[in-house]
Image (tube, rainbow, N blue to C red):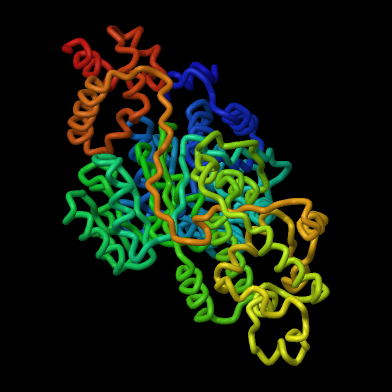
Amino acid sequence: MKLQALKHYFGHNSFRELQEEGVDAVLSGRDLLMILPTGGGKSLVYQLPTLMMEGITIVISPLIALMQDQVAALRAQQISADMISSAQTYDEANGIIQRAYSGELKFLYLSPERLNNNSTIEILRGLNINFFVIDEAHCISQWGHEFRDDYRALGMLRSNFPHTPICAFTATSTEHVTEDILRELRLENPLLLKGKIFRKNIFISAQRRVSNGHLQLKAFLHRYKGESGIIYVSSRKKAEELSSYLNSNGYRSLAYHAGLPQHVREQNFKIFVNDKVNIMVATIAFGMGIDKSDIRFVVHMSLPKSLENYYQEIGRAGRDGEDAEALLLFNAGDIAQHKKFLEELAQSEYKEHLSQKIDTLYKYATSEVCFHQQIAAFFDDAIDECVDRCDNCLNLKEERRNITKEAQMLLSTVYKTEQNFGKNYIIDILRGSKEQKLLNNGADKLSVYGIGVHLAKKEWFVILERLLELKILLLGEFSTLKLTQEAAEILRGKKELFIKASRLEINIKEKRVKQEASYDVDTELFEQLRTLRASIAAELKVPAYIIFSDKVLKNIAAAKPHDKESMLAVSGVGEKKFEQFGEQFLESILST
């Protein structure tokens, strides 16, 4: 029954990781928290059960653009869905409510702001609600990167609807955030499903930014002519400037930021998802859950605020499962800028928490450890290896510098100061600083005082970070540096230590993504099918990927079906889609 419905409505022959367990939980009326990476298929876990159950599903979603996207996708599959938002008139909203009451709707999307008032609660009491869905559930947590007060109030759903199951979904959740979601939503005996963090179709690279990074960006984009991508920048001004620069260099881009009028933002969003431009240059205002499956790259022109932000933003690439790439351009100035903004905040208990998030991301960018492994560890997960799907693993043979001597100097200084001080103090001793605090403590009398003047302060910081990431040093209470057993081996000369030369000097290289083709695609036919898809999408006024994703078009171009039966055998083509578009695509294939 489940598999039949899966093929009929969504065209899939089998479930993906954890989807079937999630569907079973929903069908059995159990509360659910599902943590699955972007592109992992979370929406199917609640959409499929709804189509198999009586009643209406209420979906709480944080953004109007996201709700519009999801409603459009469901309608394109001839599934009845609608949304109520602040952009609608009273009469429009009332008409939607009446459709819900008459049983015409299977899905009703609401914002948390709309839900958190008594009149909406009273309206919902009159509906046959099978279950609630909380999308982007991490917004409920004060420890998360997108905390929203109106999400925190969603705990009242349990009070008002004590017998209605609640299913929460997110792509990003640390242990703290997960505990917050379970507690605040008051989930009862929930099934907790957590997928693997590893997005193996995304190649991750990081480079130290030279000047404004425009030349590095051009070298990167040269490989993605005509492909869809998002470029994140740190300010409205930079969004406008970079979009203008790209357009003058032959690319088609638009800017997106909070300073634009609402109708312009919505227009630019539609132009992008409908493939009228390839690149969106955006601030973080270009928010969660962008449901465009064929984004081939995401570039950050500077460090985001946190690893959660970064992971969610790069997750917008490759949602169709095809190869995609994430490039991070950064320098130490990004840290200073973020810290400056923090200082301007009112004093709060979260300021130190936010500061640590910034430091964590900088360590991530500068580390030699596999980028995918670092992300997994941050989200309390683990992977063995990324098989050359990141810069650090692909370039293990990059020129390396022996820093054993410098490491011994640094570790000796930690030892001689009795492991009682932090990074800056230790480096100041090595460089022979005249800081009064050092002199008062008699640091200038130590044998290690001034032995490291041959390196700049920033170089010592890089070496120190290398020792921390290898766990030769640990951070103790009040960020004091502590020696481990591995430190003793370095000090005794029993072990050598190396670092990538590029970490101690700016060394820009163009990185190539390892492309993996698992099947033979007729590229000429693929482009022909893309053209047909674009014309159908324009006629129906929906984004092209709602007709068929790039991945499905490649499946079709590889299989070259000749009739309905062979078309339905293609992964991603179901009865619903064939009824709507199958004959047109078959005609196009048979005409070649």
Residue 81: give x, y in percent of width and height.
39, 38
Q: Quadrant of the N terminus?
A: top right
Residue 69: give x, y in percent of width and height.
35, 44
- Relative height, residue 235 to residue 314 (above, below): below
Foreground residue among 31 and 338: 338
Q: Is residue 480 left or right of residue 375?
A: right
Residue at 40%, 18% in the rendered image = 519
Residue at 57%, 71% in the rendered image = 455
Foreground residue among 190 and 452: 452
Foreground residue among 58 and 496: 496
Which quarter of the figure has residue 147? bottom right
Number of on-image labels = 0
Residue at 25%, 41% in the rendered image = 225
Residue 49: give x, y in percent of width and height.
53, 30
Residue 522 shows up from this direction? yes
Q: Is residue 375 left or right of residue 206?
A: right
Residue at 24%, 40% in the rendered image = 226
Residue 103 shows up from this direction? no
Q: Quadrant of the C terminus?
A: top left
- Relative height, residue 282 to residue 252 (above, below): below
Which quarter of the figure has residue 487? bottom right
Residue 43: give x, y in percent of width and height.
49, 37
